[in-house]
Image: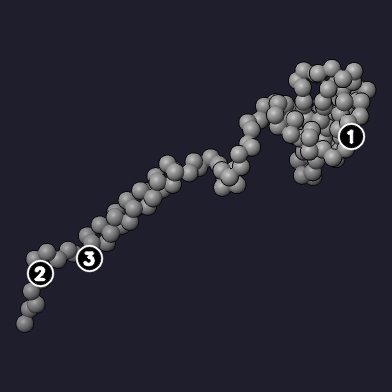
Amino acid sequence: MKLEQPANRIEPLTNVGRQCAFYLGLVALLAGGVAFIAPLNRTPAEAQDDSLHPLSGDFTMLAPLDAESDVAPKTIATFYVTGIPAKEMWDAFPMEPVEDECVGRFSKFGNGMVCYGDNGDGSPAEPPYECTFGIDMTRQSLTLAQDC
């Protein structure tokens, strides 16, 4: 006795292909919704923080200050930050500013970081605030990036 197949029955192989297409479409729809609702270039912590500021300044790779030759490998990632981020870094330093004889400005220094504020005579500097720090890429630690 031969069983009759229903007329609308889909072959299993075709059915699996259609299921995959359906699920891939659903995933694409969800991913598109996430990309539209929550920009992917910001982490959840950043999305909650209203005080984010774009960084302005410079970056360069330098040889360590104690390098013995001019051809030493450049292993110090040096960051120079200006603007509102530098002002916030200045404000966050817990020490009192001291006059820096090298640059003639008030400075706050600690653990390989230095921020500069007003000129030594109290007049505003240009830029008003700037911070610089180095990261020793071989040790993955903060280090003084430059000296007088």
Q: Quadrant of the N terminus?
A: bottom left
User: How far separated are the C-alphas under marks 3 and 2?
Assistant: 14 Å
Circle 1 residue: 96
Q: Is residue 101 left or right of residue 12?
A: right
- Residue sticking out furthest to the bottom: 1
Residue 6 shows which numbered tag?
2
Residue drawn where x is 64% and y is 37% of the image: 51
Name which residue type carries label 3: Pro
Residue drawn where x is 10% and y is 69% of the image: 6
Question: Can you give x and y, in whole percent of width and height, for residue 74 in the image?
Answer: 77, 32
Check the image and report above or below for 10 versus 4. above
Sequence-wise, which precedes: disc 1 or disc 2?
Answer: 2
Question: Which of 132 and 7 lies nearest the eye of the viewer?
Answer: 132
Check the image and report above or below for 47 versus 67. below
Sequence-wise, which precedes: disc 3 or disc 2?
Answer: 2
Question: Which of 58 and 7 lies nearest the eye of the viewer?
Answer: 58
Q: Is residue 51 left or right of residue 134?
A: left
Q: Secondary structure at mark 3?
A: helix
Question: Can you give x and y, in whole percent of width and height, for residue 148 in the image?
Answer: 90, 24
Judge the density around disc 1: few (<14), some (14-19), many (≥20) Cα neighbours within 10 Å: few
Where, by quadrant of the figure, is residue 69 drawn? top right
Residue 12 shows which numbered tag?
3
User: How far separated are the C-alphas under marks 1 and 3?
Assistant: 76 Å
Residue drawn where x is 86% and y is 32% of the image: 108
Q: Secondary structure at mark 2?
A: loop
**Is any atom of residue 32 visible in this view?**
yes
Name which residue type carries label 1: Glu
Question: Can you give x and y, in whole percent of width and height, for residue 5 in the image?
Answer: 10, 71
Question: Can you give x and y, in whole percent of width and height, for residue 39 in the image?
Answer: 49, 41
Q: Are dots 1 and 2 in contact, CB under 8 Å?
A: no
Name which residue type carries label 2: Pro
